[in-house]
Amino acid sequence: MAPLLRIDEVTAFLYALKPRGIRFGLENTRLVLEALGRPQDNFSVAHLAGSNGKGSTAAFLDRILRAHGLRVGLYTSPHLVNFRERFRVDGQPVSDERICDQMESFLRDGLDLVPEEVSAFVRGEGLVERMTPDRWYAERGASSRFSRLTFFECTTILAAMIFADLGVDVAIMETGMGGRLDATNVFEPKVCGITSIDLEHTAWLGEDLATIAGEKAGIIKQGVPVICAPQRAEALSVIEDEAEKRNAPFSLVGKDIQIKGSWSDADFLLANMHIKGLRLGLAGPHQIHNAAVALGCADALISLRPEASRLGLESVKWPGRFEQLGPGGRWVLDGAHNPGGCRVLASTWRQIHGDLKPCIVFGVLGDKQLEPMLTALSGLADDWWLVPSRDARGRAPEEYSNLIPSARLASSVGNALDAWWSSGAGPLLVCGSLGVVGEAKLWFGNKEISSPEAGGFQIKLN
């Protein structure tokens, strides 16, 4: 029997849940999971927090575990193009039908609602038409008559339900924001990974690095191993203190997990394994740290085999993270969305493309530290397009165009890319927001590119 709710109705209902949009706390998520019979007890959990590199680390860990024969669930956010990207099993997004089926169970058994009534409400209120990305925040609140849960709390619960239903061995759960009060922190992990920490979401997480690190370190559990990427001293001190307080075995990349080389020729030395001469599947100098965190997490979960680990690290793919397209890989989509991410992006571009100057298409959300992001990227290019994000939280390019005097303004990502394409489709870098990268992927996915120079380039959208 077909599900009551279509996928566009499910997402419309979820996005219309809360007028405040973001709320921290764990109790509501715990209560609903209890009502659902604790689906999270059916699999092991690896929990990841950090400012930069969570998605890449999750992708490395997912691929390593699958190379060892495990069935793996991967929960990440946000999605680039399709909502189902948030829930992956065995490397593939789950189907819309699976999400819709689980949503009905979630409404009925978790929230004690009648799915038929929710369906009638969604259609009667015209939520599908109202819940476009540029209206998500302006229109939120319509669904709150049904539940106090937020969008992210609901997707976290759905992830647990989907992974239990599909019988995964391990679920990799990426925090949405922070850690201590993030909805994912209801789970009882077997290992915790903490990636690079930077100033971000300061309105919610705190104004300084130590405070933000404290929120991220909130995922650390009593006696559960912690694998930590290299950090600045003020962040590392907080994380180490929390691990000691929780009697959690602590491993630091660069000390307890030795690394050597770069992403294109990497060596890893763990207590029980030495792997040499890997070319990581994800490009950039930072990826050796992300891969090491993933290896450490995998080592805490299973008995690692060198060849399977090598296969996992070398074959991983992750969209929107220095994703290279087109002739010579000179069209790059990267979700760098804070100062640290932009610094790493600039370094990666120079390492791979040298002095080649791209056209930069840049759009940013309103809560980001804009000037340090632009400073990090400023030396890469002379040709800029500033664009709005479709997300209602996006910052209007007119508000900061004075910071890049030569920049041109476009009314959308698509219009900027149309202009770039018409001018000869030279080197390109799209960055500043994962939402902007998602819009670029849609543009490329709709573009017919068949010239021999492009090498038959085609994007496959999940």
Image (cartoon, grey):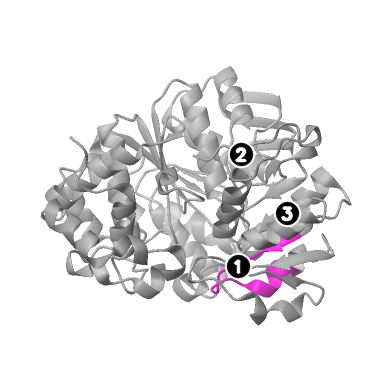
Q: Taking 73 as reference, is 31 above or below it?
A: below
In three-dimensional space, the C-alpha distance between marks 1 and 3, rounded to whole angstroms, equals 14 Å
- Tell which circle, 1 or 2, labels the residue nearer the N-terminal end: 1
**Residue to which mark 3 is pinned:** 429
Judging depth in this view, the residue of 410 and 291 nearest the camera is 410
**Amino acid type assigned to the residue bearing label 1 in the image:** Val
Task: Tell me, for residue 364, which label it has, or none.
Answer: 1
Label 1: how many residues lie within 10 Å, few (<14), some (14-19) or many (20+)?
A: many
Where residue 77 sits in the image (x, y, percent)? Answer: 45, 52
What crowding class fits label 2: few (fewer than 14 Cα within 10 Å), some (14-19), or many (20 or more)? some
Q: Amino acid at mark 3?
A: Leu
Specify whether residue 400 is in view: yes
| Label 2 SS | loop
- Image position of 279 with respect to 115: above or below: above
Give the image quarter of residue 45. Answer: top left
Total marks in image: 3
| Marked residue nearer the N-terminal end (1 or 3) | 1
Where residue 53 sits in the image (x, y, percent)?
58, 49
- Asked if residue 208 is among those painted magenta in the image, a careful observer would answer no
**Magenta span:** 360-374
Mark 3 and mark 2 in contact? Answer it, CB < 8 Å.
no
In this rendering, position of residue 189 left or right of residue 437: left
The N terminus sits in image quarter: top left
Element under label 1?
loop
Left or right, 215 with respect to 444, comes to: left
- Residue labelled with disc 2: 459
Q: Residue at x 75, y 49 (%)?
A: 348
